[in-house]
Image (cartoon, helix red, strand yellow):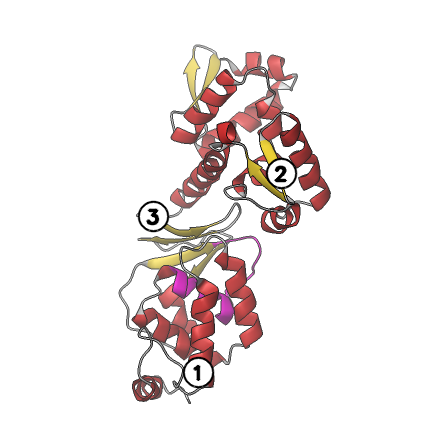
Amino acid sequence: MGISTLAEQLDWSGGHTSRIVSELEAYGYVQTKQSGRQKLVSPTDIEPIEQLEGLFTEYSHMDLPDLIAGAGLLVLYYLDQGRTATELAELSGVSQATIYRRLDDFQRVGVVGKSKSRYRLNDPFAVLAPIARGLLHQKHRREAQRHASGLNFLWETHDEFLFACNSEVTADGFYLTGPALFEAFDIPLLTRDRRHYFRTDRLSEITPAELACHTLLIDDGPRYRTYCLLLMQQQDIERTVLRERAEHYRSEATIDLRAIVDELIEYLETDGTTTTAQLPKWEEFKQTARDYEITV
């Protein structure tokens, strides 16, 4: 379809339509090609787009595109499980009033059901959650690919993501994190691991508490847990702050980050008496700390 035809159908100006198409193309949602003097636009063949097209065709009597647009996509992103309106608002950053309006719209056409204050996608539309997640992951991947190569995503929400890569990234909003950042906090680790970056508009810098959480999300094995213990001791990270940060990352983590953080805190507060198989013996930890000139 030509952009001018698309603009007429949407009742948009040609300039506005071109800008939106360019943005969607940057995200990998559509592709364009020149045909004479006209630019043609069509959807790409990525899985979430194909799934979405299938739903639009099957439920053409419903205005799914309008329902999914804007805040609707964020609601769907977090309906991967039953959630309350309050939870959806907290996770998505969308106002609770808007969340309720969107949920009402979804309920009206049978996309969403409600049971005991928790909202869930009804069976025919359960695929909308992975579609929403796939679309936003594609957007994030395209953004990261403009600045880095060899990407491996480690954690992600609708507006933040943590990834490993082979490149140095200097773009705004991308913050170095993980083992390579420990030197900035006077813990020069000898590691050859790949570089790790956190993409966010929420922060202006990576704090020690954020770094500890990122490090565990990268690798929750014994070595990285010891790194976090050193950081906690060296920077005297406030325990309540660390627990709050762990809660922020917990919902989308593949590990129980809050439980691990609690274990690290208890280990330090009890001088290694309360420990797990993933943590070093107390005397070993004290020696490691001395090697980095950290007082225990």
The quarter of the displayed image where residue 276 is located: bottom left
Q: What is the span of residues highlighted in magenta in the rendered image?
A: 199-217
Question: Which residue in the structure is indicated by mark 2?
Answer: 114
Residue at mark 3 to residue at mark 2: CA–CA distance:
38 Å
Q: Position of residue 52 (x, y in %)?
A: 47, 25
Q: Crowding near pointer 2: few (<14 within 10 Å), some, many (20+)?
A: some
- x, y percentage for residue 231? 43, 76
Q: Residues within 10 Å of mark 3 (few under 14, many from 20)?
A: some
Query: Can residue 255 be spotted in the picture?
Result: yes
Q: Are marks 1 and 2 in contact (CB under 8 Å)?
A: no
Label 1: few (<14), some or many (≥20) within 10 Å? some
Q: Label 1 belongs to which residue?
A: 268
Q: Is residue 188 above or below residue 49?
A: below
| 77 over 259 or under it: above or below | above
Q: Is residue 42 above or below residue 208?
A: above
266 in the magenta segment: no
Secondary structure found at label 1: helix
Label 3 – label 1 distance at C-alpha? 34 Å
**CA gap, disc 1 and disc 2:** 44 Å
* Tag in front: 3 or 2: 2
Tell me the kind of residue under disc 2.
Answer: Lys
Residue 203 is situated, as x and y percent measured from the top left of the image, at 56, 59
The residue located at (59%, 33%) in the rendering is: 112
Q: Nearer the viewer, residue 198 or 131?
A: 131
